[in-house]
Image (cartoon, rainbow, N blue to C red):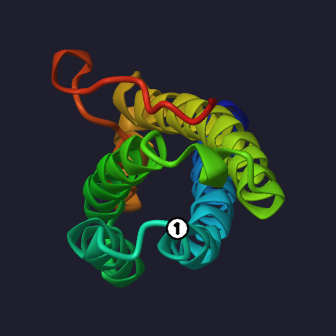
């Protein structure tokens, strides 16, 4: 009888260890996925000053547009939480859309080789951000779901695992697709 109880306790301990390790792995995967987004967002933010300087050379009187882009980039750099980063990213995207709208008025700028290279680089980064965002949100979904299903929800509560936030962009009805190509 004692051996049976010992075996049952051993199975329970093993189950707790396996579930705990799975939760840790999923948490680490979602953290890694967030860092991948952050790297791409940083690349984009680093590209913005070069883009602004290139456009400034052709459209110096568009001061408000440049100030808005710079302000949005600064807000992004100061954002701490995932939601703050998402909000700041949306503001930066909107500011860049305005900048590109200004560019439409300057055909010689649209033909500038430096501008075209920056535009191409930005387009590639935007694609990487979209992919990284999808991977992150999938990772968060798996991690959060593992915390909600039985019996791992018991282990998650015992060891204080917390749900993660999704990285969401503005609602589809509130935004337009950023126009990057000319």
Q: Quadrant of residue 43?
A: bottom right
Q: Quadrant of residue 173?
A: top left
Decide if residue 21 is on the left or right side of residue 86.
right
Kind of element beneath mark 1:
loop
Decide if residue 121 is on the left or right side of residue 2.
right
Answer above or below: position of 147 versus 45. Answer: above
The C terminus lies in quadrant:
top right
Residue denoted by label 1: 58
Answer above or below: position of 59 versus 109. Answer: below
In percent of width and height, residue 171 lies at 22, 25
Residue 9 visible from this viewpoint = no
57 and 26: which is toward the camera:
57
- For the point 56% across and 39% down, the residue is 133
136 and 68: which is toward the camera:
68
In percent of width and height, residue 38 lies at 58, 64
Decide if residue 124 is on the left or right side of residue 12.
right
- For the point 55% across and 69% down, the residue is 48
In percent of width and height, residue 45 lies at 55, 70
Residue 175 visible from this viewpoint = yes
Q: Quadrant of residue 169?
A: top left
The N terminus lies in quadrant:
top right
- For the point 64% across and 69% down, the residue is 47
In percent of width and height, residue 118 lies at 73, 58
Mark 1 neighbour class, 10 Å CA radius: few under 14, some 14 to 19, many 20 or more? some
170 and 93: which is toward the camera:
93
- For the point 68% across and 35% down, the residue is 127
């Amino acid at each position: 009888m004692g051996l049976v109880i010992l075996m049952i306790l051993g199975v329970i301990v093993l189950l707790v260890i396996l579930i705990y390790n799975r939760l840790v792995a999923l948490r680490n995967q979602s953290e890694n996925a967030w860092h991948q987004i952050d790297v791409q967002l940083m690349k984009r933010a680093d590209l913005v000053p070069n883009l602004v300087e290139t456009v400034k050379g052709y459209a110096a009187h568009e001061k408000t547009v440049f100030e808005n882009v710079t302000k949005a980039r600064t807000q992004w750099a100061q954002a701490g939480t995932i939601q703050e980063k998402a909000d700041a990213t949306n503001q930066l995207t909107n500011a860049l859309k305005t900048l590109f709208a200004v560019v439409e008025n300057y055909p010689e700028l649209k033909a500038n080789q430096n501008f075209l290279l920056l535009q191409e680089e930005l387009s590639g980064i935007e694609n990487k951000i979209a992919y990284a965002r999808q991977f992150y949100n999938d990772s968060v979904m798996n991690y959060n779901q593992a915390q909600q299903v039985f019996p791992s929800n018991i282990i998650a509560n015992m060891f204080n695992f917390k749900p993660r936030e999704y990285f969401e962009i503005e609602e589809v009805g509130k935004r337009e697709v950023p126009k990057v190509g000319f």
